[in-house]
Image (cartoon, helix red, strand yellow):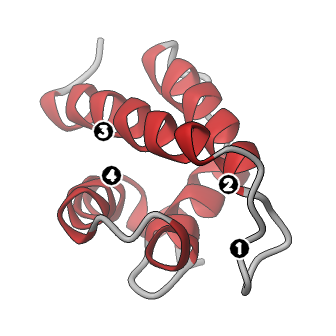
Amino acid sequence: MMNEQEEQLILLLRQAAHLWLALGHLDIWDSDDYTDDLGTFCNEAAEKVAKNEISDAEKKRLYFIFAPTCEWDNSVGDADLGNKVFGCLDALYRDVSLK
């Protein structure tokens, strides 16, 4: 059973995915990924969170995608949404992501 933060994270990841996918296939200057790749990854991660199947590696990847001044800020730049996503990720996955 999911807690409230996980439910919120799923909704936020889907919003972020929508914005990235709407940009199309664009390069992100400080990343090996493209905007549509990250949109797809966020949709897949949201599904895995919902099914409680997200791996530690995926948690860590999400954490650093949405950390301040990372891929999110350098591509979409919606600081409000990015901060909300990162807040959920930090609360849920900080220990896993920083080890």
Which type of secondary structure does the marked residue at label 4 adopt?
helix
Q: Amino acid under label 1?
A: Ile
Q: The C terminus is located in which quarter? A: bottom right
Question: Residue shown at 31%/63% (left/top)?
Answer: 82
User: In the image, is 16 to the left or to the right of 52?
Assistant: left
Q: Nearer the viewer, mark 1 or mark 3?
A: 1
Q: Nearer the viewer, mark 3 or mark 2?
A: 2
| Distance from Cα at disc 1 to Cα at disc 3 | 21 Å
Sequence-wise, the earlier of marks 3 and 2 is 3
Q: Nearer the viewer, mark 4 or mark 1?
A: 1
User: In the image, is 31 to the left or to the right of 55?
Assistant: right
Residue denoted by label 1: 28
Question: Residue shown at 23%/67% (left/top)?
Answer: 83
Sequence-wise, the earlier of marks 1 and 3 is 3
Return the mark for residue 92: 4
Image position, residue 80 (x, y; %): 17, 64
Return the mark for residue 35: 2
Sequence-wise, the earlier of marks 4 and 1 is 1
Q: Nearer the viewer, mark 4 or mark 2?
A: 2
| Distance from Cα at disc 4 to Cα at disc 3 | 14 Å
Marks 1 and 2 close (CB-CB < 8 Å): yes
**Label 2 crowding class (10 Å Cα cut-off): few <14, some 14-19, many 20+?**
many
| Distance from Cα at disc 4 to Cα at disc 2 | 24 Å
Which type of secondary structure does the marked residue at label 3 adopt?
helix
Residue denoted by label 3: 12
Q: Amino acid under label 2?
A: Thr
